[in-house]
Amino acid sequence: MTSRGSKATARTSSEARAVARTQTLIKGENGIGTVRRTTLPGGLRIVTETLPSVRSATFGIWAHVGSRDETPALGGATHYLEHLLFKGTATRSALDISAAVDAVGGEMNAFTAKEYTCYYARVLDTDLPLAIDVVCDMLTGSVIREEDVDVERGAILEEIAMTEDDPGDCVHDLFAHTMFGDNPLGRPVLGTVDTVNALTADRIRRFYKKHYDPTHLVVACAGNVDHNKVVRQVRAAFEKAGALKDPEAQPIAPRGGRRALRTAGRVELLGRKTEQAHIVLGMPGLARTDERRWALGVLNTALGGGMSSRLFQEVREKRGLAYSVYSYTSGFADCGLFGVYAGCRPSQVHDVLKICRDELDQVAAHGLPDDEIERAIGQLKGSTVLGLEDTGALMNRIGKSELCWGEQMSVDDMLSRIASVTPDDVRSVARDILGRRPSLSVIGPLKDKQAARLHEAVA
């Protein structure tokens, strides 16, 4: 028999373990820009950034699940589920959800990526409790009815058709397949017509229960907000739904591992009767945790990040061969991509590819001059700050940082990291990334002789 005193001691010990843990991650001046994190019993993390000078707030919930977590039979399930969480809960219909936010002039949406999903609402600061209640209800109380699955299937098939009608968008999915092949990172986030038609309500419900546990979620809120109030309101919403069941549960760690990309020199052509040919020439990049990502960001900006960039000047300004030409990087937990996109007349494809390949080879072999690097650093610093001028962008930054890195970095620290990039850093990453043999994806109406010559660009 356990004594009364030992019972009290055990209960006190259990309660102590169940106390929420709060940390100040970034201390702003006079509270402005302060980022705090609270981890609730049950493993739910809540991060906020305070900006008292605005009258709005953006509230979001990030789920640690994306299209790369799908099996081939579940292709498109993450995105399908994103749609279905707007279709109703035990206490709200789809109309109730949308009308509640519309009635206060707010904005509500969601997006699915390869490694995460986010649901968010942007409202006046006085309407934040409403946004918290609605979004939390969606995430914890979705009913996923059979009839809603059937109705939404049609909308998703139309979304797939819309994407396929936009070759400038579709070519990036093709490039992912060229680089990753038939594994989750190489498949489209939306799924395919066949996989979406094969998904059932029961499969989606099981996927929902597996991936929307509080330990897989991060709540992020930015704007004119009080951290403690947000924590109380979120905790009340999750406890009301019975979602914080295990007080000992801990948040899952950020993704890790190492993934090898497919062999270089691959070419994929998708024949379409389009006015332009859309091309992506690229190679493996860096994982988002790689310390060289700051140097790669500077390199990317100098090569194809603006009107003064090398590719824009050579392809568009000097020769008028394309209206849109740019470079980009994509970083995942364990790998990355670097790509150059251009849209041009089919007859100009080989000229554009040769110029792009020559520029990449030139920079890989000889690097960039100091003045171009300095200009790129200034451009990247400015665009980083200007891109964080609204509460939605701030919410995205702190939510993604918590989910993907498990830590926060202040804007000043980010600017410092960019400013500390040296010309040698940029030249080193240029040799490592651009010195690799590229692969190529093309969508357009290329003739047989043109198609046969595409391998020249990756030789």
Image (cartoon, rainbow, N blue to C red):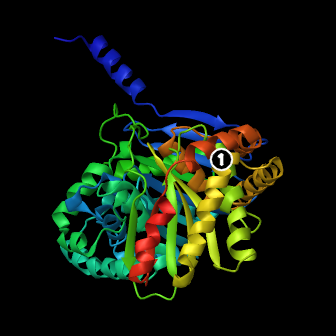
- The x and y percentages for residue 163 are 41, 78
- Please name the amino acid that badge 1 sits on: Ala
The x, y position of residue 373, in whole percent, is 77, 50
Q: Position of residue 263 (x, y in %)?
A: 38, 50
Side (left or right) of 22 relative to 56: left
Residue in front for this viewpoint, 199 or 364: 364
Q: Of residues 75 and 442, which is closer to you in this image?
A: 442
Expressed as whole percent of the image width and height from the top left, the position of residue 422 reads 75, 39
Query: Is disc 1 placed on a helix, strand or loop?
Result: helix
In the picture of the structure, the residue carrying the numbered disc 1 is 365
* Quadrant of residue 395 within the rendered picture: bottom right
The residue that appears at 42% across and 54% down in the rendered structure is 116
Q: Is 34 located above or below residue 455 in the figure?
A: above
Residue at figure coordinates x 48%, y 65% from the top left: 456
User: Is disc 1 surrounded by few (<14), some (14 to 19) or many (20+) residues within 10 Å?
Assistant: some
**Relative to residue 374, is residue 331 drawn left or right?**
left
Quadrant position of the N terminus in the picture: top left
Residue sitting at x 75%, y 43%: 412
Q: Kindly identify the residue that appears in the image at 44 percent across and 47 percent down.
A: 235
Q: Is residue 99 visible?
A: no
Q: Nearer the viewer, residue 2 or 20?
A: 20
Residue toward you, 363 or 192 = 363
